[in-house]
Amino acid sequence: MHSHLHTPYNANCEEIMTALDECHARGFLHKALGGCNDVKRDVNKCLAAERYLRAKRNRDQAKENRKKIERIWADEKALEEGGAGPAAAAAAAGAGGK
């Protein structure tokens, strides 16, 4: 069993998926003799492209989150060692200007 195709993630493939639904509605014999194969291939290509873009966005977001966490860890380590990390230096500069 496959997941539902008509989801917000696959909105760009809606037209091709509708064409596949219409092709399947033409009957079992039409499907069985390969009448919908080309449309099915197009749906698969479209869904794969959408999945690739979604995965790329997720990877990019994860990399950004990881960079933020590593900066926080570096600041905490610098504070523990007695030095002033970038965030601590910025806070000290802001407090000293009052």
Image (tube, rainbow, N blue to C red):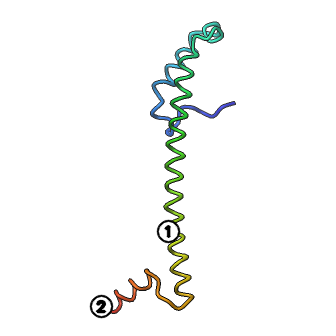
Mark 2 belongs to which amino acid? Answer: Gly
Residue 89 screen position, x and y as percent: 41, 85
Whether 82 is drawn above or below 52: the answer is below
Q: Which residue does the image show at 57% across and 21% down from the upper left?
A: 40
Q: Which quadrant of the rendered structure holds the C terminus?
A: bottom left
Q: For mark 2, does the 10 Å Cα neighbourhood hold few (<14), some (14 to 19), or many (20 or more) residues?
A: few
SS for dot 1: helix
Percent from the top left, x then y, of residue 9? 51, 39
> Compared with residue 32, is residue 6 higher up or lower down, i.e. above or below?
below
- Residue at the right extreme? 1
- Depth check: give the residue in front, 59 or 10: 59
Name the residue nearer the viewer: 97 or 82: 82
Percent position (x, y) of residue 60? 49, 54
- Locate the N terminus by quadrant: top right
Tell me the crowding category of disc 1: few under 14, some 14 to 19, or many 20 or more residues within 10 angstroms, Cα based.
few
Residue where numbered disc 2 is placed: 97
Residue at 53% over, 36% down: 7
Q: Secondary structure at mark 2?
A: loop
Q: Of 24 and 84, which appears nearest the observer?
A: 84
- The residue at which mark 1 appears reads as 68
Say what amino acid the circle numbered 1 marks. Lys
Mark linked to residue 94: none
- The tag earlier along the polypeptide, 2 or 1, is 1
